[in-house]
Image (cartoon, rainbow, N blue to C red):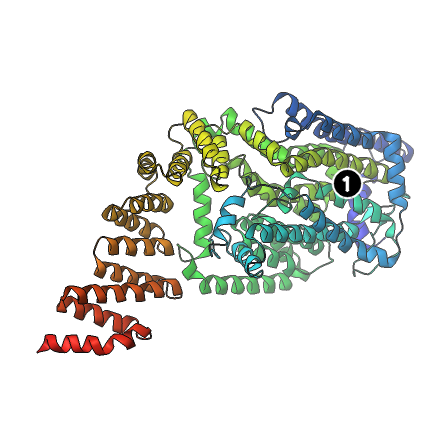
Amino acid sequence: MTARGALAYAPRMAKTHGTPERPLTTEPAQVAREDAREDGRGILWGLGILGATLVYPVLESRFWSRSLWGAHALAFLPAAWMLVPAACALLFVPRLAGAIGGRLERWRPSPRVAAAWPYASGLVAAATFWLVRERHLYWGDALPLSIDVPAGQQFHPDEPLTLWLHHAVWAAGGGRWSAVAAIAAASAVAGGAWVALHARAFARVGWRGASGAATLGPFGASGAASSGASGAGVALVATLAIACQGAAAIFHGHVENYCYVAVCFAVFAWSGVDYLDGRGPAWPPIAALLVAFAFHLLGALALPAAALLVAHGLTHRERRREMLVTLAVAAAVALSIAWIVRGLYPGGSPFAQLWAGVLKVVQQPRDMQPGVFLSARHLADAWSHVVQMGPLSLVAVILLVVARPMRETLASASGRFLGAAAITLYAPALLTGPGNLGAARNWDLFAAPATVLPLFALRAMLALEPPARQRLLLAALAASLAQSIPWTALNMDRHATEARVAALPLGGGRSEAMLGTTALNAGDLPRAERWFEAALAEDSLNVNALSGLGLARAREGRLAEAEPLLTRVVELKPETPQYHRDLATLYMRTGRWQAASAEWQAALPLEPQARDAWLGLSASLAQAGRRDSSVYCLIAARDALPADQGIASALADACALWVASAGERGDRDEFARAWATFESRCPGDARVRDWRPRAEALLGRGAR
C-alpha cells in the first residue's frame, strides 16, 4: 500500500482493529457484518439527505416562493420544467445507479486521455458557462460594473486586482466589445480554469477499488499517468457535481466580481490537501491566499484554515524549516506590496481596508441589533442563501458528515483541514443582512467561499467503498442538476427574472427599485417611473427610489417635479457624492450656477478623485461670472489628478477665457493676474505663444 493509500485507508484500519464500543475478542465475521450494517445505514442516511435536497426546490417553488428565495426557480418557469427534477430522480433508482456507477468504475482511459481530460473538461465548462450566461444585469455587481469600467475605473479598495483585470480585459478590445461582454467572457474563462483544477485534483484523490484496497487515481504522486486509471469515471461525476452547484453561477453571471477569487480558493484548498498528504510543498496554499486577498478582501477568510497548515508544518520537525521559510517570504512579499500601494487606500494600507470591512459588518447599526439579527426575516434570508449555494451546501454537508462513512474523512489531517476551510470560509455569510452587505441581491458575495463546502463533501464520497461511492456521487449529481438546470434557465430569461425580482421578499420597496433602476438605465422612463412610484408607496424613504424617480423626471424634462425628489435624497444621504452631483446637474440645467457650485463643492470632499465634479464646479463658477475661481478650481484639480489630460485641457481653456474676459473689460490688474496664471500654468499652449505680443503691449501701456 502506498503512503497516500495508507492515509486514505487509516480510519478503516483503525476500526477493524477494534473500537471502544466493541471488545477485541469479537469474531472477524461478526465485525464485518456489523460494519456492513452500519455502512448500509450511513448510505441510506446520505441518500435520504440528498433526496431531500432534490425535492426541496419543488416544495419551495410550490409553497414558499413569496417568502423564501433560495430554490424557487420552478415557480417562475412553465410547468413542464417540473420534469427536470423528476428525470434527475432516476439516478436514485438502485438498479440504474448501479449500472451507471459500474460503467464509470470500469472506465479505463488511455494514459494520454487520462492526462488530457481534466483540461478538456475545463474548455467545455468555459464554453458552457459562456453560452448559458445571464441575459440581464440584475444580480451581483453587473450594473455598476457595466457603467464604471467603461468610465475608466481601474481600482476599488475592496477588490483591487479584480477591478484592474476587468478594466484590462475591456480595454484590450479597443472598443471592439463592451465591458459587459468582456467581463462575462473573462468570468467564463475563470470558470473553465476552476473546473479544470477540480477535475485534475479529483483524479488524484486516493480511493478504494472494487477489491477494497486503497488505490490511486489516474495521476500518481508525481503527476504522471498510472495504471490505477479506474477512478477517471468517478472523478468525472465529482467534477460535474461541483460544477452544477448554485455557487458556480458566478461563472455564468452576466458580469461578476468573485470568479477570480473562487479560482484562488480552489488552488488554496487542493494545494493545502497536497501539502498535508505529503504530495506538495508549503508555499502554493500560502501564495494562493495572498493572491486571493489581492483579488478581493474575501481572500482573508482563508486565514483560519491557513493557520492549520502553519501549525502542521511547525509541529513536524522535518517540515518546520520549509514552513518558516515560506512564512518569511510570504510576509516580506505582502508587506512590500502593501507599502508600494499604500497611497491607493483610504486608510493607507490594504490591511486597514480589511479591518474597515469587518467593522462594516459587525457594527452595522440595524442588522446587528438582536431583534433584527434573530428575526424570522433574517433567518429566512440566511436559509435562502445556504440553499441557493446548491445541494452540497452548509446544512446538507453537516448532515452528511453525521453519516458515519463520510465522517471518517475527518480522521486525516487533510480531511480536517478541508472541513475547517469549508466552515470558516462560509460561516461569515450568516452574519450578512440587507443593511450591510445585502441579502437576495448580493447572493454572490459569499458564493466563492461556499465552493469549498461541496469540495469537502465530494472528496469524502470518493474515499468510500465502490457501491457507496457510486450511489452517493450519482445522487449528489442528480440533486445538483435538478436545482442548477432550472436556475440557469430562469436567469437566461429576462422576463422570468423580472417576475422573480418582483416577488423577492426584500421589503422596503427594494424589489421595485431594482426593476425601476434597470428600466431607467435602459431608457424606458415611463416604466422606470411606475416602478419607482411603487417602491415609494411601500417605503417613502427608499433613497434609491427617490433618486431614480427624480432622475427619470429630469430626463423627461420635468425639472420642477424632479428637484424636490433630488433635494430630499441629498438630505437623507448627504455622505453620497453621486446624489450631490445629480442635484448640481439639475441646478445647472436651470441656470442656478451658485446653487450648482455649492453642490459640486459638497461632493468633492467625499470623492476628491471624481473628474466630473471638478469640471462641473469649474463650469458653474465660470457661468456665475467667477472666472478666476473657475481657474483656481482647475488648478486644484490638476494637483489632485496630475495625469488627467482632460483636466489639463480644461485648465488651459479656462485660463484663456479669463484672459480674454479681463482684456475685454479693460481691467488691467485682473488681466495681469490672468495672464501670469495662463503663462505659468500652460506654457506649452499655442495661445500663450500667439497672444504674448499683445499681452505684453497691453501690460506695457498699463505700466506707463
667 over 40 or under it: above or below: below
Percent coordinates x, y for residue 672 in the rendering: 17, 71
Residue lying at the far left in this picture: please name it.
Answer: 704
Percent coordinates x, y for residue 253 in the rendering: 61, 44
**Crowdedness of circle 1 by 10 Å Cα count: few (<14), some, many (20+)?**
many
The image quarter containing residue 78 is: top right
Please state if 157 lies on the left or on the right of 222 as rendered: left
The image quarter containing residue 295 is: bottom right
272 over 331 or under it: above or below: above
Picture residue at 86% right of the left edge, 30% below the top: 94
Residue lying at the far top in this picture: please name it.
Answer: 63
- In depth, the one of 694 and 117 nearer the eye is 694
Question: In the rendered view of the protein, which quadrant contains the C terminus?
Answer: bottom left
Percent coordinates x, y for residue 139 in the rendering: 56, 40
Picture residue at 73% right of the left edge, 36% below the top: 481
Q: Is mark 1 on a helix, strand or loop?
A: helix
Percent coordinates x, y for residue 28 in the rendering: 90, 35
- In depth, the one of 3 and 674 nearer the eye is 674
Please state if 273 lies on the left or on the right of 28 as rendered: left
What residue type is disc 1 on?
Answer: Met
> Can see residue 212?
no
Please state if 251 lies on the left or on the right of 445 as rendered: right
Picture residue at 63% right of the left edge, 28% below the top: 76
- Circle 1 residue: 461
> Can see residue 122?
yes
